[in-house]
Image (spheres, rainbow, N blue to C red):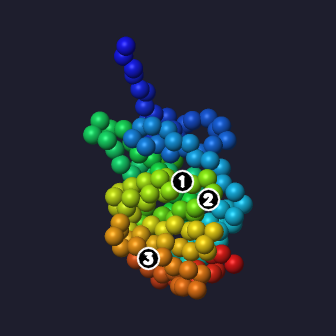
Amino acid sequence: MVITQSFVTEEELLHMPDDGYRYELIEGELRQMVPTGFDHGRYTGKLHGLLMIHVLAHKLGDVLAAETGFVIARTPDGRATVRAADIAFVARGRVPADADTTKYLELAPDLVAETLSPSDTAVEVEEKIPSWLKAGVRLALTLNPASRSVTLYRSLTDITRLTDKDELDLSDAVPGFRCRVSEIFD
């Protein structure tokens, strides 16, 4: 008996009908993402707003919301990995002038942020952060509402955990951006 596995292309993912869920594409396989709760939206929204104000004021690039997908890897046979972070930042000048921005861009954002939810498993988070960093993201962070903390990943070995008493400095990816961690969680 021959078992065939069908894979989804990024173009097919882009044009899937809305069934109430969000999806990512990992090496051509669909992964369903569960809708998030109120706290997830609240804290993600606060950081997104703080970043947006700073980025617009200084004309630094684009701050993107949760449904924005990026092709961050391909298998040797061309199957795509399309990821969507809760927040992404792409510096001005990085999007090619001829890019079709109605589709997923094939580039790694400069910054991604993921807000942990009760539905997130440790395995999911442990898989996402390395895949972003491997793709070339300069700075990845996770917001943890339960502990009111932020974990910064500059690499898999350069990891910093901040509490709500600390300052969050994202200047490595977003020039000049700083805020108190408490501004996100208060």
Q: Is residue 168 left or right of residue 135?
A: right
Q: Which kind of residue does numbered mark 2 sit on?
A: Ser
Which of disc 1 and disc 3 is earlier in sequence? 1
Measured as percent of width and height from the top left, residue 11 is found at 47, 37
Q: For residue 117, which numbered disc appears in the image?
A: 2
Q: For residue 160, which numbered disc appears in the image?
A: 3
Quarter of the image for residue 90 reads bottom left
Measured as percent of width and height from the top left, residue 77 is found at 29, 36
Identify which residue is drawn at 63% across, 81% down: 182
Callout 2–callout 1 Cβ contact below 8 Å: no
Q: For residue 121, which numbered disc appears in the image?
A: 1
The span from disc 2 to disc 3 (Cα, nearest Å) is: 20 Å
Q: Residue furthest left?
A: 76
Identify which residue is drawn at 64% across, 38% down: 18
Identify whether 77 is placed above or below 177.
Answer: above
The span from disc 2 to disc 1 (Cα, nearest Å) is: 9 Å
Who is closer to the viewer here, 153 or 171?
Answer: 153
Total numbered badges shown on the rendered structure: 3
Q: Is residue 151 visible?
A: yes
Which of disc 3 and disc 2 is earlier in sequence? 2
Circle 3 SS class = strand
Q: Is residue 61 left or right of residue 106?
A: right
